[in-house]
Image (spheres, rainbow, N blue to C red):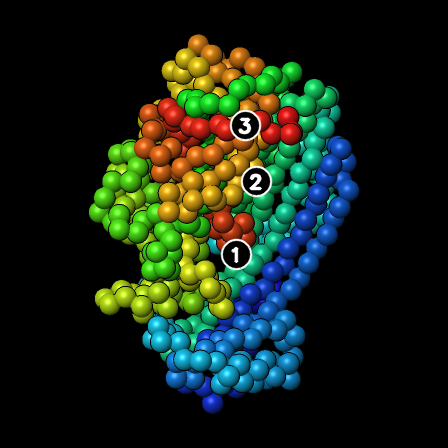
Amino acid sequence: MTDRGQTLSLLKKTLGLSADADQTEIFFWANDSHLTRFANNYIHQNVSEKNASLSIRVILGKKIGSASTNLLDPKSIQNTVAKAIQIARNQRDNPHFESLPSAEGKYASVNTFDAETASVTPDQRAKIARKVIEVAKKGHLTASGALSTGVVQVGVVNSLGIQVCQSFSRGALRIVFQASDGASGYAESFSTKVRQIDPEEMAHQAAEKCAQGAHPVDLPPGQYTVVLEPYAVGNMLEFLAYLGFGALAMQEGRSFMCGKLGQKITGQSITIWDDGGSPQGMPLPFDFEGIPKQPITLLENGIAQAVVYDSYTAGREEGKVSTGHALPAPNTFGPVPLNLFMKNGNSGLREMIESTERGIYVTRFHYTNPLEPIKAVITGMTRDGTFLIENGQIKKGVRNLRFTQSILEALSNVSLISQDTRLVSGLDDELGGTVVPALKIEKFNFTGATAAV
């Protein structure tokens, strides 16, 4: 991983090779990643990968050309710039394109790099995995999972004055415990600082789920009250971001936000925003065009407020500017919020369970897919900790169920929100994260059983 000065020097030299273009953007991505994976209570894989790439986007009038390379010698970079220019010459004009963004606004000052996390050794990762496995063995359980550590460096330079570069350290641990009767438990934790990950606490959480879920039973499909842990709530927010919180989805008429700005689309207790500058999440102070990320309120008290923009979608609407939510070019998907937050409430998980006469407790969702984007309907399965609640207590484990549910309808039936929130994985595991509470939802549709327990 090169230092900031060396990276910016490389990007500026590359920019100087594109004198034939009207505008040019150079995007740099370097990834130094390490993974220790374990299954059946032993480590079976330890891998490392280092890679760096340049993506060049050139503008000739309203023609756009893009090319990329991970060969960073001078000749390869020069050839890639020439290729991007040649591609642009062969393109049709893009009538919606206005300009690459210029250097405006202030970047949030957040610490995204931790030297200890960047330098974790295979032996250190093995010791962390061992702590998880030892808890599993004591409970006669089988542990599987993965611990990843590393650093991502992102840099953007363009011909309109943008020059940004920052490094982001990451540590992530995900574990699944399984019992001989099919019960399973899950826990995940990730942070810019690997020392903030507590493997033993996570292992005990997963083991407790296995104990609670012993000898799981079948439940018929139907509409149930549910208590969703933050893992499941975060998954729903991921799909809101994917399906409709971006401007291009609005402009193309495929967003659940279409025609709904200023209108109530969820329950009054629901407020969702995006903030790449918050240290409570996984901070990302600028987007992949180098624009400062703006905190954006998307839903406030159930009312649709806004969507996020990049420079291209902002250029398609009069009076709009980028909110700093561009994905790497070339990008046909449009801008997406990667740092989502949901407002917490004043309840606890115990209160949610004790107030439920009959319902289902869900740890997380798995294999979730969209069905109706305009209605934000998704389908998926419960996994690794699904329980029957009766008379205010978790009674027994439940075999996994398939759900088919509108996220907006679910968020319109929220009766309790936890005070505690949790950082969970988001749309981008490397440079994103979602901070969410647990939810109690009065009506949630389960449409069938799954093959797995």
> x, y percentage for residue 303?
25, 42
Task: Report the residue marked by disc 1.
Answer: 168
Packing grade of label 2 (10 A; few <14, some 14-19, many >=20) is few
Of labels 3 and 2, earlier in sequence is 2
How many angstroms separate mark 1 from mark 2 (CA)?
A: 28 Å
- Residue 448 is marked as 3
Residue 423 shows up from this direction: no
Residue 3 shows up from this direction: yes
Residue closer to the observer: 380 or 99: 380
Of labels 1 and 3, earlier in sequence is 1
Packing grade of label 1 (10 A; few <14, some 14-19, many >=20) is many
Quadrant of the image occupied by residue 422: top left
Residue at image point 60% right, 60% down: 31
Q: Tell me the element at label 2.
A: strand
How many angstroms separate mark 1 from mark 3 (CA)?
A: 42 Å
Residue at image point 66% right, 42% down: 146
Task: Report the residue marked by disc 2.
Answer: 367
The amino acid type, in three-letter code, at marker 3 is Gly
Residue at image point 36% right, 51% down: 255
> Outermost residue, top direction?
391
